[in-house]
Amino acid sequence: MDYQSLWFALWAVLWAIYFFLDGFDLGVGILHPFLPRNDLEKRLAMNSIGPVWDGNKVWLVTAAGVTFAAFPAAFALIFSAFYLPLLLILFGLIVRGAALEFRGKSDSPAWRRGWDMAFFLGSLTTAFLFGVLFGNIFQGLPLNAQGYQGGFFSLFNRYGLLTGVMFVVMLGGHGALWLAVKTGDELGARVRRFAMKIWAVLVAATALFFVNTAFVTSIFASYINNYVLLLLPAGVVASLLGMGMAIMSKRFPAAFFASGAAVILIVMTGFAGLYPQLVPARPDALYSLTIYNAAASDYTLRILTVVAAIFVPVVAVYQFWVYRIFRGPVTGEDLRDDKEAY
Amino acid sequence: MDALALSRIQFAVTAMFHFLFVPLTLGLSILVAYMESRYVGTRDEMYLGMTKFWGKLFLINFALGVATGLSLQFQLGMNWAEYARYVGDIFAVPLAIEALLAFFLEATFIGLWVFGWNKVSPRLHALSIWIVAIATNMSALWILLANGWMQHPVGFAIRNNRAELVDFMAILTSGYGWLKFFHTILAGYVVAAFFVLGISAWHILRKNHLPLFKKSFRIAATFGLASSLLIVLVGDFHGAEVGKAQPAKLAAMESLWETERGVPFYLLLVPDPTNERNAVELLGIPKMVSFLAFKDFNAEVKGLKAFPKEERPPVWETFLGFRLMVALGGLFILLSALAFFLSRKEALERQPLLLKALILALPLPYLAGELGWIVAEVGRQPWIVYGVLKTSEAVSRGVSTFQAAVSLAGFTLLYSILWGINIYLLAKYARKGPEV
């Protein structure tokens, strides 16, 4: 395997990990107005992600940073073509971060309602627009020798919108299962009853997404060259089934991990179908960005390989360790005397 | 205004906002870590109260520092796509390394610190804030090695229509980058020291929690004096490096038009860029500029006229930014020295003049930091990468004036609101005092 292919794989994996990890805390934000019903329950939901959401977000910094370092031309094209959606994603991430940190800093109900809304809208915007963005990459962008030829509104085409909705449902479900595992009291019980419903919506959305992917994009067409890749969509189906069965038998930690597997495999299904392209061009594939014409030099990729080989596992180990320290559900009892909590 | 001008203003606005949060994080993390270590060592509840009080202010500030950093990274692709394409092979490497080596540590262990008071041992808890402090400063190192490369590009070759990395070690060992790093973190330490001094002074004047705030005051005075002295030393080395690597910036900093030997330093100087001369030059210290820049009283210093007009940086901003920064640096030494010596005496609360001065001085190190960045970035113009790529060639081609205007307005509005909330919360919790 050449360095470009290795970095394509790592690039895809980093984005997938990002959606797995930040995915559940974005999902908690998406569900924020609906499942937690009073101030204490809202605090339970926010505190369940409190110790980890910041660390999760760094996977985005890393995924974007690796796009920049390993494929500078792709970073330049994608980030400038998706100018306004990325601006809104930034605003979404900024206000939801501020909401988490600032909500508990005053007892005024209006203050808290405002930040609840910011947390919800920031999370929803981020999840939806990332879906729109990757949906457009999967189906290809209107590119010619002058670069990107579309505008802001052309990104909201049928497939882009569908992928956006897909992401909201997928991350919402992922967040619900996180809450099912990580919150106690009445909120936990309510979320556990709700899980089956969002699972059904997720199955429907995924089916719709796959059918459209087959017709609108050339993702599955490129699987013909490599049948092994069919394991990815097969894995999605298996994860969704496992998720449903685990919810039914009330094994929520298992359901959460099945949901995580589904998130990762759905994203990877799309990425694997792009290879060796990074951003397919429509209508003329001549202008596509591929892993070869967009890549950094071999020397740079070698340095990045050494750094990633050492530090990605190290990061994974200490993040896992911190997750373990905070294992177990958060309850009202925990929050009563804790002045540092959100 | 076109997309280029708007993109430049936007980067300036977002970077300057970012640098309202970062310097405090750099220094206060170390002070809080020190306070918690003292608590672990002595089990004195006062140190615990101190750690939690300053820690709370640290966290309010920290939240926005992280969020506003992401905007800078994204903008390099959104607004500066040609820059990203042309130098990404080099510039993005330290950026990616920063995320993997430093940013993950910082973000993961801050979570452990905030939520882990009852989950881990006091020792491990104190260790986690030390990790945050070290990671924050390490993160600054990688960012400033990247910025150092824009100021003084090394270890690259122009190939395949772009700049490609050929010698990674050259970037890692770039003197320019390391001096920028020390200069910037020390600036952050001065900000943090004056932050703690100012708020402590406010409480000491009101006789609130005297032992806690007098102790905080003393810690910050020592930290502030050491940092404001060291920053002069580093700044001096840094200035010499600027003289070698970016002579046009040095000329603008000193508003020097003709190339001369033994250039004097005028205490009073008014530039007149339209006529390419200075309107006023008074109170000269003979040969001082030559000496400061090159450690040789008779060294030749290039004047602005040695560069074609289109390759000169804006003189007023660079000149004033530098002058004011240096003057403020002097003031910080004076104030922190006074604070240091008077805090050795017991009767600190009977020094209302100094205490009031320190409250007023709280925002000044922030100002000095912003001025320093103006010198660094405006003084490098018209280049984005000195001698390699012009700022005007680096802007995204596909981004319209409309898009850039919308985003600039959005950033300015959102950041102003968040900054207002941040100040409100900092003031609220600073006034409230420790909960002991």
Image (spheres, rainbow, N blue to C red):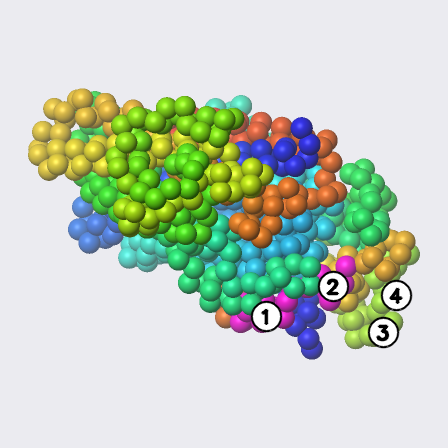
Give the class, few, some or many, for how many residues have Cα within 10 Å of label 4's Cα (few <14, many ≥20). some
Q: To which residue does mark 4 refer?
A: A221
Circle 1: residue type: Tyr
Q: Can you give x and y, in whole percent of width and height, for residue B240 in the image?
A: 35, 49
The magenta stretch spans residue A301: yes
Q: Residue A293: give its label.
A: 2
Kind of residue at disc 3: Asn
Q: Residue at x 8, y 33 (%)?
A: B346
Whether discs 4 and 2 lie on one chain: the answer is yes
Nearer the viewer's eye, disc 4 or disc 1? Answer: 1
Which kind of residue does numbered mark 2 sit on? Asn
* Mark 4–mark 1 CB contact (< 8 Å): no
Q: Which residue is mark 3?
A: A225
B279 left or right of B289? Answer: right
Front in this rendered view, residue B303 or B390: B303
The Cα atoms of the two marked residues, 4 and 1, are separated by 33 Å
Residue B234 image point, x, y percent: 31, 49
Specify whether disc 1 shares its chain with disc 3: yes
Q: Residue at x 45, y 62 (%)?
A: B172
Instruction: Return the disc, 1 or 3, that comes first in the chain's sequence.
Output: 3
Q: CA distance from mark 4 to mark 3?
A: 8 Å
Q: Nearer the viewer, mark 4 or mark 2?
A: 2
> Residue A299, labelled with which disc?
1
The range drawn in magenta is A289-309
Q: Amino acid at mark 4?
A: Ala
| Disc 2 versus disc 3: nearer the observer | 2
